[in-house]
Amino acid sequence: LSFSWLAVISAMIANQSAALKGVQGKSVMKEPWVKAMGPANQYGVVNILSVLWTLPVCLALEMPNWQENWDKALRKGAKQDDVIKNSLLSGFAFYLYNEVSFLALAKVSPVTHSVANTLKRIVIIVVSTIVFGDKMTKEGMAGSAVAILGTLLYSLAKNKYGGGGH
């Protein structure tokens, strides 16, 4: 594994965006016209709007290099059908994961949702290191421990002092 400040900053932006999505999603869910749609349809509308918003940016940034990157993938031994199939399956799995996440958000507070999402990421990292036999660095272990401890402390505090509901 290697360290990159760009990766750290990008991950922080992604985490902040996910938290913001949770807070905004939860606040919009309270609107009567949104409640009438139900969480699954709300998520569908959010995705459609997201595609419309980001498609021009993606096309502007990715289209100039599309053919070069496609050819590079095929030169490295990937089969065209496999790339297409795996891309579609990956996108579908990610959509389902996010829809389930949005359905969960409808049941809990945004903070609880964010904490659970953080714990999920740590579990994935730990399980991946075990399954793939990767060694975790001391920094990785410390980061995982801090995240797990923070999740535990949040849960204990919420149980003791009550939570903001949902």
Image: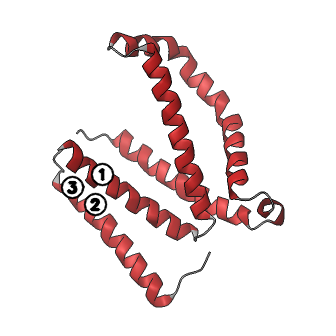
Residue ID for mark 3: 139
* Residue at the spot 44% in from the left edge and 16% down from the top edge: 69
Task: Locate residue 89, reporting x and y percent.
Answer: 50, 33
Task: Locate residue 92, reporting x and y percent.
Answer: 55, 38
CB contact under 8 Å: marks 2 and 1: yes
* Residue at the spot 27% in from the left edge and 60% down from the top edge: 143
Rendered image quadrant of residue 107: bottom right
Q: Residue 44's mark?
A: none
Residue ID for mark 1: 125
Image quarter (top left, top right, bottom left or bottom right) of the N terminus: top left
- Left or right, 82 with respect to 111, comes to left
Q: Nearer the viewer, mark 3 or mark 1?
A: 1
Task: Locate residue 12, reporting x and y percent.
Answer: 43, 51
- State the SS at label 1: helix
Q: Which kind of residue does numbered mark 1 sit on?
A: Ile
Q: Which kind of residue does numbered mark 3 sit on?
A: Glu
* Residue at the spot 33% in from the left edge and 65% down from the top edge: 147
Q: Label 2 vs label 1: CA separation?
A: 8 Å
Q: Is residue 81 above or below residue 48?
A: above
* Residue at the spot 53% in from the left edge and 35% down from the top edge: 91
Q: Earlier in the sequence, mark 2 or mark 1?
A: 1
- State the SS at label 2: helix
Q: Earlier in the sequence, mark 3 or mark 1?
A: 1
Q: Nearer the viewer, mark 3 or mark 2?
A: 2
- Left or right, 128 with respect to 159, comes to left
Residue ID for mark 2: 144
